[in-house]
Image (tube, rainbow, N blue to C red):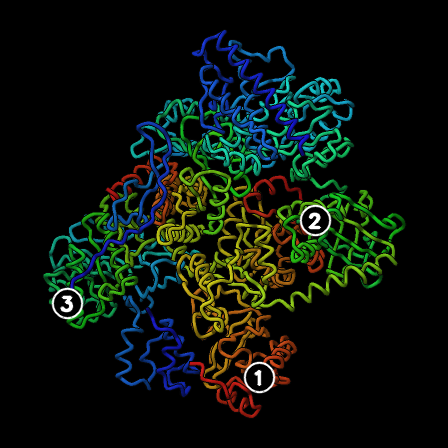
Amino acid sequence: MPFKSTPQPFNAAINAVTVGVGDKAMTLGGENVLPLYTFDAPISNPPKIGFEITDTGLELAVPGIAALYEGAATIGERAKKAETLEGVDFISLKFAGADPNGENKSAEDCAAVAKEVAGATSLPIVVEGCGNAEKDAVLFEKVADALADKNVLFLSAKEENYKAVGAAVGLAYGQKVGAESSVDINLAKQLNVLLSQLGVKNENIAINPGSAAVGYGFEYVASTMERIKAAALSQNDTSLQMPIVTPIASEAFGVKEAIVSEEDMPEWGPAEQRGIDMEISTAVSAIAYGSNAVILRHPESVKTVSSFVKAMTE
Amino acid sequence: MALKGLDIFKITPKTNCKECGNPTCMAFAMKVAQGAIPLEKCPHISAEVMAELSEATAPPMKTIKIGAGDKEFTLGGETVLARHEKTFVSKPLYAVSVCTGQSDEKREKVLSALDTIDYDRIGERMYVELIEVNDGTGDKDQFIELTKKALTYNRTLVLSTTNAETAKEALALCKDEKPVLNGATPDNYQEMNAVATEAGVVLGVCADTLDALYDTVAALEGLGNKNLILTVSDKSMKDAFAFAVQIRRAALKNNDRTFGYPSLVHVNRLAAGDHNMQTALASLFTAKYGSIVVMEEMTYSQALPLYGLRQNIFTDPQKPMKVEPGIYPLNGADENSICMTTVDFALTYFVVSGEIERSGVPVNLLISDAGGYSVLTAWAAGKLSASSIGKFFDEFEIEKKIKNRTLVLPGKVAVLKGEVEERLPNWNVVVGTNEAVELVKFLKEFKG
Amino acid sequence: MSVLTDLIYAGSDAVAGLTEGLVSDAINQYGAEKTIAFPDTAYFLPTIYAATGVKVKTLGDLPACVDVLKSLISKKEDLGEALNAGLATAVGAEIIEALKYVGKEDPYADEAGIGFVPDPVIRSLGVPLVTGDIPGVAVVLGKAEDASAAADVVKDYQSKGILTFLVGDIIDQIADAGVKMGLEFRVVPLGHDVTAVTHAVTVAIRAALIFGNITPGDLPGLLAYTKERVLAFVNTFGALNEIAVSAGAGAIALGFPVIVDIDLAENQVPGALESVLDHKETVKHSLNLRGIRIKIKEIPIPVAFAAAFEGEIIRKNDMHAEFSSQKNPAFELVAMRQENEVEDHKLTLVGPDIDGEAPVGLPLGVVVEIYGAKMQADFEPVIERKLHHWLNYIEGVMHTGQRNLIHIRIHKDAYEKGLRLKDLAEALYCMVMDEFDSVVDKCQVTLYTEKDTVAQLLDTVAMPRYDARDERLNSMNDESCDTFYSCILCQSFAPSHVCIITPERLGLCGAVSWLDAKATKELTPLGPCQPVPKEGCLDEVKGVYTEVNKAVEAASQGMVQNVTLYSLMQDPMTSCGCFECICGIEPFSNGVIIVNREYKGMTPLGMSFGELASMTGGGVQTPGFMGHGRHFISSKKFISAEGGVERIVWMPKELKDAVGDKLNATAKELYGIDNFIDMIGDETITEDPEALLNFLTEKGHPVLGLAPLM
């Protein structure tokens, strides 16, 4: 009896969510198979790769990243350089400096930065907040206004601020809302339902159901994403069919393995390569468990992960 | 569908004879149902019933053992496709590859790294478990020489050659160490099978297509060999992944036991010379369905994420990872630095210690035994209490070892403050933050 | 009624006539091609666009609109029809206001009012409206008899964060009273003409279009949105002419109640059009009528309030005052009341405060009275249990116990800082309103410290209430309810596990009763507990319901398809791992054994609790084995499909002692057996199945006469 290789696509699909405008707009999701299972059905929108630019330029401490930006004085110029990187699908602009416990930059200043970046690149833009729920709500409203016609995805609306973010970003300015919940399928679902009740349409929602570097509780991320995809595809659970966007950069470059200097840990080798490997491993794992887009910080990671995605889906 | 415990109980003699090593027939039946012991352990079930049931009780994916002594490893035996469904039982093993014909310099680099990368992470030894010896030139003597060299590194070997003669001679050197013989193809499987069976080692099967692989496995099973590993395609990344997923899915979901074997993935061949892409692929196949992942080499920068990933994915989802109780001095803390305490749940420890490290403030992090639960769960289960903290202080003689008398409690168990103060009257007990992310600010502003 | 409808129709007619005239004048003056538009909006003439879908762009588009407007004025003697005529007035007013912008850049340049509110302002207002940061919108119009009273009303709205639009001469009255105006102060003058009210109306309408995704032309959808989601209301000051009445009818049609300060007597329409003559009551009444609740951000007490103080212990020497049931009558009670019995935020102390030399010892009765449209008596204990936490959160207050056995201490430092009993009441009030706002509309707190009063209230009010609750708990059964609840609190570690909680079967963790689940659902509607209708009964004995199966399948993401409520052998309920007890079949006696988590020894099954747990937990179904809570053991529903509690043949001694009385009662009731517990084995009798069988035979255990389990 020969092997029966039967494709096993599902009758349900992940929502297709478009971010950005013009030729370079990108669509996340749309697939009716598990992540990378092209042998079940073609995946027309392969996972997308974002490149992270921070307003504070904290990533410039890494030599390989600084090299990319050589000669770029402003954040707009940095965005221009980033756009030329091979494999970049979108720019992720992170407002680390807006954190009230840090530089506490005003929402107006951030909106000006956003405008500058949007003026410099035609790639789709994802905006990441500072993580402070209250500040992000204010920040996103201003940035959503400044980038009113750019069809931007905002990361993210959380349980604490979903009303403000959903209303400002999703309703008032018709942008895309990223819903972030803490590694639990039911919390993810609950937030999606709350956003829809607020009036944000499903096709305007992407989700970030939690992220972590590999080795740092990544199993919870993995299982949460696997369960979300299973519920979305096999159970046709419409409140979980949103594409998943996972910020990898700050997780990967935030763990000891990527931070500790070579002087402190000589046998570990150069810190930069450790950051790259940590980022690649985390990004590929996230994609394997369900991310429709990952946000990366190092040009080398972008190069590898984008060729990986290409090789796996074309 | 596996049999339920009660169905198995019905065919036991129900005498509680204990000959199977279990106190009751019920206990025996439940363990068989879990796949923990084979039905054959019961001497009183008739051969007829046994035959009828062995198929139903046999696990969908075989458990394959490779290596010997302290280098013995278990592969396969999985019953689920996703870790949340139950538990993965066998973590993938990493191999580095040496090859006849490759430069000595390169080989030295690969092998010498093996001693360096050997460390402990939350109670698990992290090292490269296997070396694959590749027949790059087809020259038997070179292969034998290389096998001899590889054997000096005290690892279990994967001998990859399609030449049965070469295989036979190499196995003569090391068959007691139970290496894997990898290289049965649709063309040579009969000879390779004879060599592997005679040596009593696991046989790796390769083929270009899933169909050919399937037929070859079926043919080998027909010859009585069910001690196999399946090598996935090395034609392209996409094919390799398609093989790995479809093999595992056929066995576990579609109950096709011909594919019920562990898999071997040649990441080294799929992305030869590309360090970063090998990191990517090794991660992919760690996440999904690689049993042995062969890399060109393993550098420390690759090992750190890969072993972390593997440890994460292959933990029992119902049993949290724990760190050892004790004093963890961070940021150069000494006896005059403040103390903070939290639970031994590994994730909590990592997150809390990470944030403390980010703050730069010297802190003695005190981890007491809380059953591996998170703060609130441990508190609710009574595993984190004033008396558990007090007991920890006594056992580890904290008051002798540390002069500072400030202890910060996790904010979520503020309720313990009073009791802890009573239990540790010499201490200034402070309630910390609810979330770890708030620690940097808390510590920087803390005047204690 | 007819006076009111007559007035409305008269006003609508007047506005219609005026509009028609102005439209034809404008067309004569500028020509039909002349553009008409409000500034900075994508919604044309928003009321017309939203209600009909028509995009008015030129003057030539207007006559058709006037016809529609006139058709709305049916003159039928019916309030609903009259309200439609009010909408006609709104449309007319919109046209009249829009005409002001024809040929003029800013017709409001010389006005105190701002006229049309542009889209960007609405976008920025929308967010605080959606989040509740702006709790409501007041439209204040007319000319007040008493300007200072009107100013007080507006100031009160301002202090509560309400957005107030002003229309008419009241603008000048408010300005003269020194009220700061402008968007940032949330007091916005629109214009002196009564038609300027349209600028408030279009704000509500565009909010519906922008934030409510209402399709232009979907009038019922529009009206439903403004009624349910735009928390606006109208206050009028001074005498009303027919145009104002007609405009008010339009507001009512949009769902905005109108509160007037003249006596309408029998012309009032409860809930929609009401007279409030005393201006001191205007704000409160308006907010109540629209169901607007003001969130308290900080609790105004002289000491800190935070969860961090929960673990504080106050020693005798540090204590200023003490209330202890040991020494004095003391109790705390949360009681549901009728709407008219509760005055929101009324805090009362009956009796002496804690002033004086330490230690002050007093009796204490804490009575929290609650009214809420969605409040149920079953939530009383849920809220009452929180009193303990809230009082502990107050810096310098320690609280233990509940009901009529409580003990409260107040620290000397807190007393020094000025903490008094009313502050306790304030904290409780704020927390009730904050945490239970989904069910509580009004709350008042009364503290009693006179011995006789407290003792009397304890006997006549509190104790009967406690007893009634206990009685209800004991009398509830699965037959008498029509809803079960699913609970997925444990899914983070047992992903496919779902508990079905019924009145007689609490969650297997022992912590979530049916009442808790019900309250959880009401308080967090999308939370872990969801109602499951008790419908589609397939097997009454085993407890098989199609709705239960559906709920379990959905909540387990398809991992578990069928569960029975009362059977151990067929599709038993799954277990997460937090079960208090496991019950498993003991084949030699045909019975079941139960082992609790605390028991470390061996059972007659040859398996310890740990071994049993490993095969029962994780959300898998293992027929013959099941996790459950301690309380379930004495339930009449305990494995009732297999015969019920008389199947129990063995339990650890500690568990037997804990559940013995109740189990005996159940066995007596079900089978007429006395002292059933004595027939059940335990580890002091034997851990061996054969010896157990002998013991059961000796005791004449009823299980020996039952049908085989498998």
Mark 1–mark 2 contact, CB under 8 Å? no
Q: Give the CA distance from mark 1 to mark 2.
A: 49 Å
Q: Chain of mark 1?
A: C
Q: Quadrant of the C terminus of chain B?
A: top right
* Image location of residue C225, percent across then percent down: 53, 36
Up the image or down, C171 lies above or below A236; here it is: above
- CA separation in Å, label 3 and label 1: 58 Å
Find residue B219 and name its label.
3
Residue tagged by mark 2? C371
Residue C636 seen in render: yes
Callout in the foreground (1, 2): 2
Secondary structure beneath label 3: helix
Residue type, mark 1 in image: Ile
Helix, strand or loop for disc 2: strand
Look at label 3 and name its amino acid.
Ala
For label 2, count other residues whose C-alpha is less than 10 Å away and answer few (under 14), some (14-19) or many (20+): many
Instruction: Give how far apart the Cα atoms at labels 2 and 3 are.
Output: 78 Å
Q: Nearer the viewer, residue A261 or C335?
A: C335
The N terminus of chain B lies in which quarter of the figure?
Answer: bottom left
- C423, C451: nearer the viewer: C451
Within-10-Å neighbours for mark 3: few <14, some 14–19, many 20+? some
Q: Position of residue C580 (x, y in %)?
A: 56, 69
Q: What residue did someone put label 1 on?
A: C680
- Which mark's residue is nearer the viewer, 2 or 3? 2
In the displayed structure image, the side of residue C663 where residue C530 appears, left or right: left
